[in-house]
Amino acid sequence: MGNQTEAAAEPTVVVGVCLLKGKKVLLGRRRCSLGYSTFSLPGGHLELGESFEECATRELKEETGLDIDKKRMEFLTARTNELLLEGGKPCQYASVCMRAVMEDGGDGEPQNLEPKLCDGWDWYEWDNLPKPLFRPLHNAVLAGFNPFRA
């Protein structure tokens, strides 16, 4: 989910990870002021010099302790550009979304390694997502985004 306590003064690139397990995707309920109590993909801010794949791998590990099969990771979309005004300071996110599966087809369960930013992680069927979704994910879903069809 990244560090939303420091809202950017200029647009920020964020990378979300659609981690798939069968017909389910991993989501967590946000605790930070930006999108508080909404469900979001794991992910966070792209660091200088980092590839989308490196960011997705790092963020997922930092937030959940899970490892991605880097050979099977795929770029899905860069379709959202959100101006977020809630949570204190305004910020603008350009969102990239990557699709991934766990390393070695693992069945490991996510840990909540950032409890100040997330209430915990769980697996949800794409056709029965929890509500409310974090606005960038909500808008992507409304526009037809589906990590299982992409």
Image (tube, grey):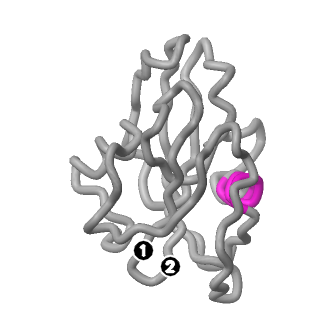
SS at mark 2 in the image:
strand
Report which residue position mark 1 lands on. Answer: 24
SS at mark 1 in the image:
strand
Q: Quadrant of the C terminus?
A: bottom left
Query: Dot 1: within a 10 Å radius of its alpha carbon, few (fewer than 14), some, or many (20 or more) residues?
Result: some
Quarter of the view holding residue 53: bottom right
Would you say residue 2 sits in the magenta stretch?
no
The magenta-colored residue range is: 56-64
| Three-letter residue code for mark 2 | Lys
Q: Position of residue 20 (x, y in %)?
A: 49, 73
Query: Dot 2: within a 10 Å radius of its alpha carbon, few (fewer than 14), some, or many (20 or more) residues?
Result: some
In this rendering, would 87 be left or right of 115?
left
Residue located at (35% from left, 71% from top):
125
Q: Quadrant of the N terminus?
A: top right
In this rendering, would 34 be left or right of 136?
right
Residue 125, placed above or below residue 134: below
**Whole-number angstrom distance, CA of label 1 to CA of label 2:** 5 Å
Q: Position of residue 102 (x, y in %)?
A: 64, 77
Most foreground residue, 101 or 81: 101
| Three-letter residue code for mark 1 | Lys
Residue located at (32% from left, 48% from top):
131
Report which residue position mark 2 lands on. Answer: 21
Residue located at (43% from left, 41% from top):
38
Quarter of the view holding residue 17: bottom right
Residue 84, placed above or below residue 44: above
Question: In the rendered structure, are the residues bearing label 1 and label 2 in contact, judged by CB atoms less than 8 Å apart?
Answer: yes
